[in-house]
Amino acid sequence: MPSASAPKRRGAANKPVPTAPARPRESRRSIIEVSGLSKKFGKVTAVDSVSFNVREGEIFGLIGLNGAGKTSTILMLSSLLNPDSGSASVDGYDIVKERDGVRSSIGLVFEEEAVDIYLTGRQNLDFAARMYDLPREVRERRVVEVLKTVGLEPHADEKVNKYSGGMLRRLEIARGMLTYPKILLLDEPTIGLDAQTRRYLWDYIRRVNKEMGMTVLLSTSYLDEADYLCSRLALMDGGRIIVSGTPAELKRSVGEHLITLRLSKGSEKDFIARLKKMGWIKGVEKSDSLILNMKDRGIGIMEMVKFARKYGFDISSIKSSETDLNDVLLHYTGKTAEEQG
């Protein structure tokens, strides 16, 4: 699949094309509005009555494990997949009734790569720009500008089969930016990349958002990525949005100070009951360990170890941490990122 919408923009060759976006960085206007959107594949409900909005100028994240419904949501918003029910608009265009308007407003980067490895980076982008009927002078200028934005200018005339995985993803993003879309839709943009390359790509996405004024809707199963990039998030599980808010709000909803431990002696049930009598904890999550949401930051590892010894429990492992989005995922879905696959 192409990383930008394939249909040509009607009349693009006859309209003046700005060399840089004039849109403001911040705005409260909802540029994407989704209401009760649903999609089934046979008996499987991939997206189940999803509702959310994305404000112009922000980076908004759809997060969740594989199979949560994120990609199907992105495909419906790009007008490439029809919803079964509900409605949505992108830059004011209805995703079913006004597909041309939707596709003229977005750049789209799929999880799967879609480049010609026997062409250079510049040739790949030039071919994509021709699909939009951009005039030659505009096409050449745009290709240079987006290559520079994603840091590929020094490699523009190298064949793509020589590119690293990170360079390929940056080329995909550059292609999605060719028409200076108002909205960039990114579906798992860093999947399969090493940690260092992922971090570099995050910075390019921030540059696109900041310097080119593009609203970004990001679908990702990497929670550290969402935390770093997104101003707001919606957590999806089983096709539904379970909770939404800023990363800080979601983490605060779970707790700000956590102690994770395992017992080698004593009943977990009795241990938790005694902790509750002490008034130390707000709540408990169970996975392969006990995750204690502490009321008081002053209760740390030493206090917990002393408490366990006093009441005849043995702790085999213990750690203290601040809440992260993995804790949010476990709290709201009962699943962990390690279950990905």
Image (cartoon, grey):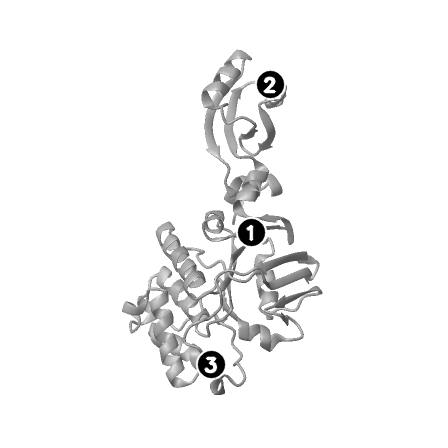
The residue under the point 45% across, 56% down is 191
- Place of residue 231 in the rendered image (x, y in percent of width and height, measured from the top left): 51, 52
- Place of residue 112 in the rendered image (x, y in percent of width and height, measured from the top left): 47, 64
Distance from the alpha carbon under mark 1 to that under mark 2: 35 Å
Mark 2 falls on what kind of element?
helix
Vertical comparison of 140 with 278: above or below: below
In front: mark 3 or mark 1?
A: 1
Question: Which label was assigned to residue 80?
Answer: none
Q: Do the residues labelled 3 and 1 touch (CB within 8 Å)?
A: no
The residue under the point 62% across, 70% down is 92
Choose the circle earlier in sequence order: 1 or 2: 1
- Place of residue 201 in the rendered image (x, y in percent of width and height, measured from the top left): 39, 58
Query: Residue under circle 3?
Result: 131
Distance from the alpha carbon under mark 3 to that under mark 1: 33 Å
Distance from the alpha carbon under mark 2 to that under mark 3: 67 Å
Q: From this viewpoint, is residue 118 visible? A: no
Mark 2 Cα-neighbour bin, 10 Å: few <14, some 14–19, many ≥20 = few
Mark 3 Cα-neighbour bin, 10 Å: few <14, some 14–19, many ≥20 = some
- Place of residue 329 in the rendered image (x, y in percent of width and height, measured from the top left): 56, 43
Vertical comparison of 258 with 106: above or below: above
Question: Which label was assigned to residue 278?
Answer: 2
Mark 1 falls on what kind of element?
strand
Question: Which label was assigned to residue 233?
Answer: 1
Q: What residue type is labelled 3?
A: Met
Q: From this viewpoint, is residue 255 visible? A: yes
